[in-house]
Each structure stands twice: as structure tokens, then as C-alpha cells.
Amino acid sequence: MSTTDSPDAPVHRSGFACLVGRPNVGKSTLTNALVGEKVAIMSARPQTTRHTIRGIVHREDAQLVLVDTPGLHRPRTLLGERLNELVKETLGEVDVVAFCLPADQKIGPGDRFIMNQLAPLMEGRRAVPVVAVVTKADLVDRGRLAEHLIAVDQLARSVDRDFSAIVPVSARDGYQVDELTEVLVAHLPEGPDLYPGGELTDEPEQVMVAELVREAALEGVRDELPHSLAVVVEEIVEREGTGEPSAGRPPMLDVRVNLFVERESQKAIVIGRGGSRLREVGTTARRGIERLLGTRVYLDLHVKVAKDWQRDPKQLQRLGF
Ligand SMILES: Nc1nc2c(ncn2[C@@H]2O[C@H](COP(=O)(O)OP(=O)(O)OP(=O)(O)O)[C@@H](O)[C@H]2O)c(=O)[nH]1
């Protein structure tokens, strides 16, 4: 019998957890707190996390891959419907779902909508365990927290289900973040690391780059451009003759990015007077991209109008949704 078969060998677990919840409930912040570094692009505004961004929690005894889904919400536009399909697909494949419900807000129709979507996944032979995570626990006192935990329990009972656990956390001050990791890891199957080598994120570079540009482009003008901006990375190529591999110097990268808006007026907002805003966006985004990719970057931004792209399936496909 080899040593690995020994009953005393420590168990190693690995698998996927998916964070769901209404927009703005703290999913991105929690992902960052669990992983311990900034991986998801955070925002004070709802529904900016369009892509499924994963972070990886590495532990001696486990590897937990987190999927931070876009806010699961009621479909209003075609884009919304696509998002919801994506969310459902993602949910079917994970080992455990973490349903985030903020402590400082009463359970509302949005939460009940998500609960109804989760209910069918929570029964049967291939049932997915759902852990209720009461986020932003720092914002309420003990009494209100206790009341909220009861309301959360009742939410599951209202659809004849039970949460596997209910865990209050605060991503802001770290309260119970490690406990939540324990609870999620306990639901993972035994297995080796899914991402050996310890990469922090398996998000394709292009998506991360697009998120950084999008974030910079929305800064200060979110009210004017809430959901009307799509960012597509056209290419990331090495500039010839710029690297010195022997000296450990990576080549400079040319990064070409298109920003799509729906109207000429929005194009003018993004570009600013005499191109001043676009230059600022470029500088901010370039710094982030250089940190992300660990090398010098020349960032080339183009702003284009794609009329009504949120409602046009062809445009959506072209824009990568
Ligand atoms: N006080 C407090 N605020 C928090 C906590 N976690 C998140 N927030 C705040 O809540 C807001 C929303 O947090 P996000 O992490 O962006 O929420 P999200 O669910 O990822 O939002 P979407 O990307 O829109 O789906 C931000 O302003 C955060 O700073 C927490 O534990 N305590």
C-alpha cells in the first residue's frame, strides 16, 4: 500500500463556488476578501461586472475556484436575458453556490426572484448545496443581524428548501471570511489542485484588460453612460525588438481596444473636449494594464458608435456577449 492510500493522509479538496445575488450586495468585494487580492473590478454602481470573473483561494488542503457572476436580475433588455442564461449555466456546473443577501437591506422581490431560480437546483440527485451569505454584517447591530438571519432562513423555507448553512460575514472588516471559506471548502469534492502553479486568476488577459478600460472610461460619467458602453480588446501584440529576454526585460505590448457606445452624444462624453477625457482614460487604464501584465504597454483606444447594441443579437455577438 502506498503512503497516499494511508487513511491518515490529509484530504485535499478542490472545486468551484459561485457567488450569486442582486447587484451591489457585495459579491466582488467578498471575492477579493476571500482571495486576498484585488481580482474582480469593483464598482460602487450596480451591474458593472458583466463577465464571469474568477478568483482562486489557495490553501494547503484545498483549492477553491470562485466565480463572481454578473448580478442576477430581472431581464429588461436582451443583454439581461443573455446574462441570466449565463448565470444559470454557471450555476449548474459548480459544487456550491453562495447566495449573498446584505444584512442592511430587507429581503425583497429581487432576492425572492433569485431564490425561485435556485430552488430547482437545490433538489434531486445532483442537487447543488446553497450557502446563504449575509454580507455587510458590519452595517447592522446584533439584534438586526439576528432578525435578518431568521428572515433568510424563512426565504428558503418559502420555497420548501433549506440552505446548507447561513453565514454572516463582513468583507470590509474580515469578520467570518475564513469561516465562510471553511464552509465552502467542506462542500468541495476530494481532488488535486485544478489550477496548479498558483495562478491567482484564470480570467483571460483580454477580459481583464477590457474591464480595466471599461472601469476607467466610466469613471465620473456613470450617470450618463450606465449600461451603454462595451469594450472589446482587438489585439495584444508584442512590439518587435523591444524585449531583452536575457536581461529579464519583457517586450513592450501594443494593446488595441475599441470602446462602443450607442449614440454620438455618448461618444462625445467619452472623448471629452479636444480628446482630453480619452487621454485621461488611456493613462489610468494603461497603468492598470501594466500592473496586470507586468510590462510596458502602449494603449491605443478607439471610440465607435454601435447603434442600440444592447438590443441587437448580432451586435451583442460581435461585442463578445
Ligand atoms: N460596509 C460594507 N460595505 C460593503 C461590504 N462589501 C461590499 N460593500 C460595499 O457595497 C458596494 C457594492 O459592493 P460590490 O462588491 O461592488 O457589489 P457586487 O455585488 O459585486 O455588485 P455588482 O458588481 O453590481 O453585482 C460597494 O460600495 C462596497 O464598498 C461590507 O462587507 N461592508
Image (spheres, grey):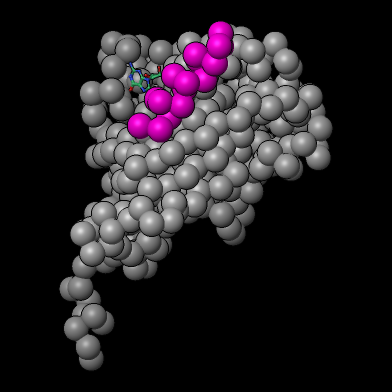
Q: Looking at the picture, how far across and down is residue 205, in whole percent?
A: 46, 48
**Residue under the point 66% across and 17% down:** 267
Horizontal side, residue 177 vs residue 312: left or right:
left
Horizontal side, residue 63 vs residue 73: left or right:
left
Q: Which residues are magenta?
A: 272-287
Q: Looking at the picture, how far across and down is residue 204, in whole percent?
A: 49, 50
Horizontal side, residue 82 vs residue 42: left or right:
right
Q: Residue furthest bottom?
A: 1
Q: Nearer the viewer, residue 20 or 239?
A: 239
Q: Is residue 273 magenta?
A: yes
Q: Looking at the picture, how far across and down is residue 208, in whole percent?
A: 46, 41
Asked whether residue 110 appears in the rendered view, the answer is: yes
Image quarter (top left, top right, bottom left or bottom right) of the C terminus = top right
Q: Is residue 240 above or below residue 225?
A: below
Q: Is residue 80 above or below residue 1?
A: above
Q: Nearer the viewer, residue 10 or 202?
A: 202
Asked whether residue 74 appears in the rendered view, the answer is: no
Count of numbered badges drawn on the protein: 0
**Residue under the point 23% across and 91% down:** 1
Q: Residue furthest front?
A: 241
**Residue under the point 46% across and 26% down:** 282
Q: Nearer the viewer, residue 140 or 225?
A: 225
Q: Main secondary structure of the magenta part?
A: helix
Q: Nearer the viewer, residue 31 or 197?
A: 197
Residue 108 falls in which quadrant of the image? Answer: top right
Q: Is residue 4 above or below residue 186?
A: below
**In what quadrant does ligand 1 lie?**
top left
Q: Is residue 222 magenta?
A: no
Residue 155 falls in which quadrant of the image? Answer: top right
